[in-house]
Image (tube, rainbow, N blue to C red):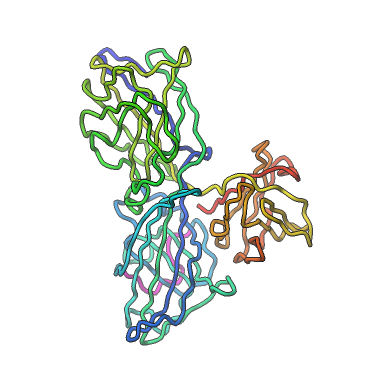
Amino acid sequence: MDQHENNVVQLERPQVVNVGGARFGLRGFMRVQLINATTGKCRWDSGFFPNKILTAGRNNMNTVSSWLTHCHVGTNGTAPQATDTQLLGFVVSTSSTVAFSDGTQPSAPYYGWYRQTFRFAVGAGHGGQNISEAGIGWGASGSVLISRALIIDPITQQTTTVTPLADEIMDVTYELRYYPPLSDVYNTVTLNGVVYDTVTRAAEVTNNRWSVNIGDAIGQYSPFVSSWRAYDGALGTITQSPSGNPADHNAGDQYDEGYSNNSYQIVMMSPTGALGWNLGAGIRCIRIQTTAGMYQTSFAAQSGGATIPKTTGFTMVMGWTLSWAGLNWLNNWNMIAASDSTTPVAGEWNTNVAETLLRISWTDDDVEDRQNDLKVSSGTIIRIEDTTDATKFVEYTVSGSYTEQASWTEYSVTQTAIQNSGPTVGNLCLIRNMDV
């Protein structure tokens, strides 16, 4: 923090979520149904399958005000790539919505979700077409997509083609999830020559603030005085806000700085005047509402743990950076030796000797069932890091659809990167979905 001649205090930006892993994650799922327009009977149902979040889509999640407005279908069966910008065999799109809902997962693993069902009516241009791909975006053409996926058969879990009959409507349901960061982020800032240690974590992860704005531009929730709130108590858990007495901003003049392409982050600024954030005991924590959830940061001076002494003698400008990217699947899968016959039990992963098959147990070592998270699309890069040394990792690119075995998910893969000989057999690992 620098003190200027006009007695304005500007706080350096503590990075609350960042590319180091403390960021909120994105995951999307699609479902395709063919329904008789007269009887309402469903002839075919894919169930939910994962989609590819596209680079171009992520670059527009801050700059486009509403980006889940259209569904597109097409006929091309080429595996999705992050660099795709449109369907490769675009046929038709629709903005007709027949259902939508949102909510939060009430227990770990926490996430907010939004679900929307798009309907292609009889005669909408899809009838008789061999539909093999679907995408979600915000325009009627095929060139503004957030996601693209190939349609998956619910029994074989392989890509497939569906052909709507002349009397059938086609419903495509899209679900997008925001996963809060589960690990704390540590930083330091200097305010008037005093060095403060900061700790940042998610807040109120079961609050609907994690779901109601999914699909809206990522950034400030709204320029309300309560959007940035200061507290004189301790940092809360990820299901809570900070404790103690609160103090609101004194004016609704928060703003987002401009987006930098391919940064996948936005800096949110909150200037407060002489009457804002004044607490007799000083500022111990702040809580920030965004369109992608709620977060909290604590401040403690390195010399004695003092709070920020905000008074009517100062105005402040506090900056805060929010980023969005892929999803970590958490820690605690134990690496077992490569084998053509050994399969992983709960808390384990391995490959075959040739490293062309990757096998991951549905359950990690925290006894969490991760089967749904492990469903990824062809082309996804999976990074596996040794938790004792993050510089030891290996990356595999999925070359086909996943296969569900007795208690694990199996992928056909190609090893595409390895550093420091990769993870050590017997060590716990972080498995990261790089499908961004």
Asked if residue 159 lies left or right of residue 192, the reply is right
In this orientation, which residue lies closer to the viewer: 252 or 231? 231
Q: Quadrant of the N terminus?
A: top left
Asked if residue 376 lies left or right of residue 42, the reply is right
Asked if residue 34 lies left or right of residue 427, the reply is left
Q: Is residue 90 magenta?
A: yes
Residue 265 against residue 353 in the figure, above or below: above
Q: How many marks?
A: 0
User: Residue at coordinates 33% horizontally, 22% vertically from top-left?
Assistant: 10
Q: Is residue 210 magenta?
A: no
**Where, by quadrant of the figure, is residue 2 drawn?**
top left
Residue 346 against residue 195 in the figure, above or below: below
In this orientation, which residue lies closer to the viewer: 19 or 296? 296
Q: Which residues are magenta?
A: 84-94
User: Residue at coordinates 41% horizontally, 86% vertically from top-left?
Assistant: 165
In this orientation, which residue lies closer to the viewer: 215 or 177? 177
User: Residue at coordinates 53% horizontally, 75% vertically from top-left?
Assistant: 160
**Residue 245 point in image, percent of width and height:** 31, 26
**Residue 91 point in image, percent of width and height:** 39, 74
Residue 431 against residue 254 in the figure, above or below: below
Residue 4 against residue 343 in the figure, above or below: above
**Residue 256 point in image, percent of width and height:** 31, 38
**Residue 419 point in image, percent of width and height:** 69, 42
User: Residue at coordinates 41% horizontally, 60% vertically from top-left?
Assistant: 175
